[in-house]
Amino acid sequence: MGGGSASATTTGERRFVPSETLRFRPFATMVFPSIEFAVFFPPVLALNWLLMSRPRLHKPFILFCSYVFYAAANPKFCLLLGGVTLGNQAAATLIDRSDSARRRKAIVTAAVVLNLLTLGVFKYYGFFAQDVNDLLDSFGLGLPIPLVTIALPIGLSFFVFQAISYTVDVYRGLCERAKTIDVALYLSFFPHLVAGPIVRAREFLPQLASPRDPAQVAIGTGVFLVGLGLVKKVVIADFLARHVVDPTFAVPEAYGAPDMWLAIYCYAAQIYCDFSGYTDIAIGLALLTGYVFPRNFHSPYRASSFRDFWRRWHMTLSRYLRDFLYIPLGGNRKGKWGTARNLMITMLLGGLWHGAAWGFVLWGGLHGLYLGAERILRDRVKAPPTWVGWLIVLNLVVLAWIPFRAPDLNIAGAFLGRLVHPGALTLLNPGVVIALLLVFGLQLIPERPIEALRMRFENLSPAALGLGLATCIAVVGATVPGQAVPPFIYFQF
Amino acid sequence: MRHRPKDLLICCGLAVLLLTFAEGRSVRHSGNEMSAGWERTLVLAVGNPAGWLADRLPLADAASALSKALKPGEDLSGGGAGSFANAGSRTATAGGVPPVTPDAFDPRALGQKPPSPRPLKTVLVTGDSMSQPLDAEVARSLTPKGIKVFRDAHIGTGISDTSLVDWGKLSLLQVKKDRPDAVVMFMGANEGFPMKVAAGEVKCCTAAWAAEYAYRARRMMDTYRRGGVARVFWLLLPAPRSKARQDIARVVNAALYTAASPYRAQVRILDMGAIFTPGGHYRDAMSVGGREQIVRQADGVHLNGTGSRLAADRVVAALRGDFTGP
């Protein structure tokens, strides 16, 4: 960042104000729905394909672009991203070169611990320091841990998890040690850098081994996903947040039960559209650049069991937790109660992964409880009809979003209390009804219409796709209120 | 059907071309709004020629009409009624000395009995990101008492930067819409921008910049006090962590003190620095209710939930000085 404004005061003192200090941008980054990204992406895309056949130029170019993208948030964070990359590559190299199983295990353990320590320091220090201090204080032990706040680098949880995936997969022999530039590209590739999806090393690194086939570019699907993601995020999620979710979660005391029930369904729709919208754009951009990311959502509010829900919601995190936490804990091999315990531990830590707050832990705990209870009751109680299961799962999932969204547990408690407080329905309007029908309705109908629409895009001519994309961006841009698009919810995780 | 890279270039090239014709002015405008740096240079490198093209083609007008039809809310950027751009004479005086009115004195400062507190019915909590979650905390405190609290935060805006929101214009609209009995204002996370004045441009953090800032804040205070009917509670900035931001915060606070001087009868200045950063020394944590607690966000600028609750307590206590009900 350069520039700034310098001037002489009347006393002759020269003051200098760095330009980056002027505008405060929470979770600042080059978000996809922004002018900065619209200027950044087209030349990157064009050069990406021009250089594709020359890996010696192509890879450094994409790596450079990804770091530029990340530096828009804070250039200092690039050092951390680079450090995590080099640290894990060093561990993978040592694992690769070692013949001793014990030594390999020690190296992978140290690497995982260091990765988690990095995550812990940046993400959880303040949270734990406060609570540990309070605990010590309640026992009269004056062992104060310094209470300081540490800025959370954007996307840390995502790239640290992917780094662990690389090192562990090399240790397990599931993927070979890659070149350093490939590992750097895997961790920093801009479409998934800040909020996923969590791509496994063995899924992405083979795609870097050889140039992408230019005859296999799925332009239609890429454009379709980018457009769909923009509509989900800017038109639906932000609309619901502005009109219903933000006011009710900020001051639950101002609303009665009808508004509060409306608000939790709206939040369920908002977080789905916000996160799956981001993912759609990320997958679409990756496709346009020639790379394939795994699917991250599959109509989650259609699930008729909690197990089914977690196979449809944030699928890349679910399988990550399954492979790196649940199965190593013993998975379902420890009997019913042991399985329930493993599910609870997995979901509690999965909740904590989202952020350093008790609300996330409670949300994870609720899902652990749901999954454990479902597992225990499965053989004892006759399974309800599918539609009853769907109704139960949907409503319990929606209720669990309350501690996830509420700023703290006190407000979550106040919110729950208002769910039975008489009052009028003041926040419902035609826009909200349409948004809810779109979000929940489209998940309930068979997928064929959406798939058919995507296929139609795939068959459109390049000119029609360009016209469609431009129209979509213009219309979506026109619905953005005076200020910029709010950051994606998952940027803070 | 799978396409070839050439098709991709046709598709994206056409989209970029159409958007350039339709939205070129927006790209140029956004670039002009951004603070100096490589991002601004990049956006303006595209925005200037795109804007030039858009000015000469009718597509931009069609896009503008579409935007007006779909965009929620009013255009709050500079220009129009109440805008700081319509500054008028900043030196209108009689005989070179501005008149002093009784509004300049808080009756308590003169040893007189203040007017009897009247019932508080409506409060507007507004500002930039500093006003969040203070606004929610104030609302949670007052709403159960039957007081209507309007919350109107405008993230990323500042008094010294009118490109996103012109606070001169916005304050007029807020008062017209809600007619609040009291206005709680907390902003300053995005200040330090050069400001246009009659003689050109003033840069932070000179006395000339402070004077212009005070002038703009005074206009807002005058709008919010509604001719003496309403009360304004303006929160000063606690010291931020970074030295550069501290320099700006110091000048903003000094300007606000000066801005409020003609309206001491109606405008209360609440010093958050005294609570959170006594002596101007930044701290992340402080003793709250006998426990050491973090009160700032990790950015070193904003108050966190605990800090905002403390600030809200101070605001509610100040409201009790002028109103019954809180």
Image (tube, grey):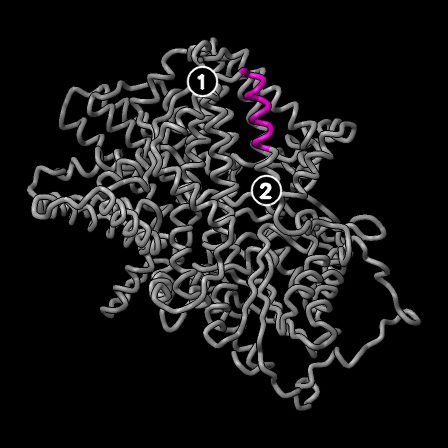
Report the residue at 15% width, 39% height from top: A329
Q: Nearer the viewer, residue A295 or A409?
A: A295
Q: Can you say which quadrant of the picture contains the C terminus of chain A?
A: top left
Q: Which residues are magenta?
A: A461-473
Chain for disc number 2? A
Q: Position of residue B207 (x, y in %)?
A: 75, 58
Amino acid type of the residue tagged 1 in the rendering = Ala
Q: Position of residue A88 (x, y in %)?
A: 31, 29
Residue A110 included in the magenta stretch of the image: no
Reading the image, the residue beneath label 1 is: A218
Report the residue at 85% width, 59% height from top: B88
Name the quadrant containing residue B219. bottom right
Report the residue at 62% width, 45% height from top: B71
User: For mark 1, does the 10 Å Cα neighbourhood hold few (<14), some (14 to 19), or many (20 or more) residues?
Assistant: many
Q: Position of residue B96 (x, y in %)?
A: 90, 69
Main secondary structure of the magenta stretch: helix
Q: Decide: marks 2, 1 in contact (CB < 8 A)?
A: no
Chain for disc number 1? A
Residue furthest toward the right? B95
Q: Position of residue A232 (x, y in %)?
A: 47, 38
Q: Secondary structure at mark 1?
A: loop
Report the residue at 33% width, 59% height from top: A130
Reading the image, the residue beneath label 2 is: A479
Amino acid type of the residue tagged 2 in the rendering = Thr
Q: Is residue A326 left or right of residue A216?
A: left
Name the quadrant containing residue A175. top left
Q: Nearer the viewer, residue B29 or B275?
A: B29
Residues at discs 2 and 1 both on one chain: yes
Q: Secondary structure at mark 2?
A: loop
Residue A312 seen in render: yes
